[in-house]
Amino acid sequence: MLNPSAIVWKNGWRASLARALIITRRELRDSLRDWRIVTPILTLTIVLPSVLIAALRMGHDLLERLGPDALDTKILPFSILAIGFFPMSFSLVIALETFVGEKERNSLEALLSAPLTDRELFTGKFIAAAIPPVFTSSAGMFTFVILVILTGGTVPVSLPLLGVFWLLTIFQALVMVAGAVIVSSHTTSVRAANLLASFIIFPMSIVVQIEALILLIGQRVTMLYIWLALMIVLVILLRTGVKIFNREEIVAREGDVFNIKGIFRNFGSYFKRTPREALARQSSNLTKFTIWRLYRHDIPQILALNKASMLIVSLSLVAAIILGWWLSSWKEVQEIIGKTTALTAGGDNPVCSTNLASSVNVYSNFSLPVTWDGIFLNNLRSILIGGIGSLFSLGIAGLLLLMIAVGPFGLIGGVFAQLKLNPLPLLLGFTLPHGIIELPAAVFAMGAALQMGSAFLVPNPGFTVGGSLQLAIVNYLKLLALVVPMLLIAAIIEANVTPAIGCWLTGGKF
Amino acid sequence: MIEAVELVKSFGDFTAVHGISLHVSEGQILALLGHNGAGKTTTTRMLAAILAPTSGYARIGGYNSVTQALEVRRIIGHLTELPGLYNRMRVIEYLDFFGELHAVPPKLRRERIEEMLQRFDLWETRKLRIGEYSKGMRQKAALIRALIHDPQVLFLDEPTSAMDPHSAKMVRDAIFELKQAHRSIILCTHNLAEAEILADKIAIIRKGQIVIEGTSEELKRKLLGVPHYQVAFNQPLTLGLPTGLADLVEIVEQSERGFIFRTEEATRNNPQVLALLAKAGLKVITLSEVSRSLESVYLKIAGQPQDNSLSRDEVEQSMKKKEDFTKNLKGATADQAEELEPTHPEKGAVK
């Protein structure tokens, strides 16, 4: 029995504050136990300031370059897009609540007992969630345009292009809603879903920034291509959403506690198991972990499991080369190229007397000495940055990084074609010897990175988002056991063999 | 109508249901009793085609709960443990929504909604938003939702929890009518009295297994042994009980004004007991069965703290012991009966 005199009720502001802090402690503990709160807070704290500074510098430079009319001709059209984007990000809350909100309010089970197929349920929810953002974005854009006209301004966009802007905005909204509904059907609380929304808004804001860049450059028709890309992404998301929608998992999942011990235990258990054993949640007859098993079973299994994502990465590489080639026809790009003197028809190739490796190195800002170890460290760093970036961008950052790295090859090819020169000896000679190893290594690594990013949207059947993510990270790390040696070999070839072959093939001249 | 065979459900390393088999015919009510977390809800979710069993199968109205899940959902009504309604809707809108999902034609829907709301005393409050309803009213609204399409099979999880006695009786009457209308019902409840009143069969679940199943009487007999009978005299017992009585039945307890005995063959032995007492000049006021509640059965199996309660094996052992005892008793009484028969059969009417 508790002695009543043991309880002393204190008054005064200190005691009052102490009681308030009891609430604070509980709330904080609760929040910090949720990895979905902790991770974005830490990430955004570190990433956002640097992104903002870079964006400000870029904006400043651009305004200087574009001149005094930039506000009307460049910024206003972008504002129409931005006006459409903001309301949709707020309306996203509805999409994020679709399933998990009902689960929290205990009304979901009755709905799941109703005679509806998974597709019907998902589609119904998707349409309901899509209507508010589509409507608010459209209304926002319409109001903005009307207000510009009413206040005596002119809209520097033709009506068909305005239609493209509208379509773009609608599809951005639909893509975000599709992502949010998928997130909602795979999370255990509304709070978790809202936090994961940043992983939807972040990639989409990258798309908006690309749109802004294109607007500033003036290639407005390119918007149509972005619209097409968004449409493809939407179809993929909807198909994936319906495919992975599982009413059982929605009902069965409970809790998102940030359990460090549990996380380590999971990592350990996924590491010990082969990827297939981990996926099957096999707990008996496990194959013993050895280095031999890692190369003989784990890595081949990971590559087999990542087939789809590696295909996406490969297609992105092809797209990047085509895009690079296409960019070479842009007036603005040609102007830039025209200013450079490196690519002069019939000129001596300076690389043959030094080293070509850095001339197509997109990471020039981070360039390391062009020796085998410098190349190796640079490539390894790119792979790791791509992996980490993918984690926070649904895999998009890794893909973009690789596309940016490969795109210049298309650009060089395009420029050579315009100069009526054969780009093949240059491209093959200076890339193929090491590229034959480096490129597959990059595809393997970025495929695994894409798996990590997509774990948020497409968790493995029977796994939570966290569990899927942990397994994807373990698989990525295991795959490094193959990728790192490949990068090492490629770097040695690139530093010592490639220049010789390249110079021999091109005869030291372009 | 409802058939489950060796249903197993695992979530990762945790197995919530270990091989549950059950059968509920048309017009039958099966009550599932058990602790919170015993596996009742998981079982009903599997039967309602929300969860797919890890192994085993279930057929509802002849439809497989996994491969014909949609058909199963069409013929079932599912009252979930927590009513979980759409608080911003009015009850008519809410019921209309579910009626529409179940493809009830609009006119019929309107009629049915009015009929059900009237029946469950919600008609007067139909214009309120569900958020304004009391717990009991919400529970009734949820029950109507489960009944709106007049399903062949019903899974009712705590249908009368949070209800006042009047409403609870109203719901019990409705369930009884559904039974009369040949509906198959699985009732998950903690209300043992309700289970005893309504259910044809009772299954007690513990740690994901049905540890015992049968009618209320069968369960009592299996777990509490043969029935006990109490005899009361109109005067204190001075000379003791007549000789031969202890050979006929087992005397469990004796006091000045009466005694308690048990016998497996009440129909046969009780008249003989009365005859023996009358012969000895003892005036009997009452001879009645000592009431034994379902609660005693439930507590024996599931009511103990989890680690002390009986496992399926222990229940089976306990039941075997009871059966052995009963057999012995039966044997003894049969032998004794041969010796004592026939006595005064006209006095044999014992209730």
Image: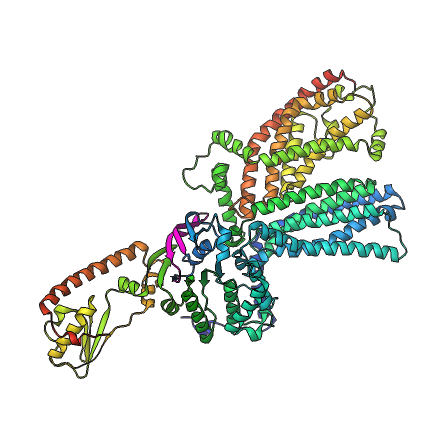
User: In the rendered structure, does residue B6 fall within the stretch colored magenta?
Assistant: yes
Q: Is residue A493 left or right of residue A278?
A: right
Q: Quadrant of the C terminus of chain B?
A: bottom left
Q: Residue A29: percent from the left, percent from the top?
A: 56, 57
Q: Is residue A25 above or below residue A56?
A: below
Range shown magenta: B1-27
Q: In the rendered view, tell whether residue B41 sits above or below residue B343.
A: above
Position of B336 with respect to B6 (left or right) is left
Q: Residue A145 versus residue A235: which sits nearer the camera?
A: A235
Question: How many numbered marks appear?
Answer: 0
Observer able to see residue B317: yes
Residue at 90% x, 46% y: name it.
Answer: A68
The location of residue B132, given as percent across then percent down, is: 58, 71
Name the colouring of the figure: rainbow
**In the depicted view, which residue is nearer to us: B54 or A91?**
B54
Report the front residue among A431 and A249: A249
Q: In the image, is B303 to the left or to the right of B237?
A: right
Q: Where in the figure is residue A218, as x and y percent of width and height? A: 83, 41
Instruction: Give the x, y percent position of residue A124.
Output: 62, 54
Q: Main secondary structure of the magenta part?
A: strand
* Observer able to see residue B120: no
Quadrant position of the N terminus of chain B in the picture: bottom left
Examine the image and state in which quarter residue B105 appears: bottom right
Q: Residue at x 28, y 56 (%)?
A: B316
Position of residue A417 in the picture relative to residue A119 (left or right): right
Residue A240, picture quadrant: top right
Residue lying at the far bottom in this picture: please name it. Answer: B235
The verdict on residue A451 being magenta is no
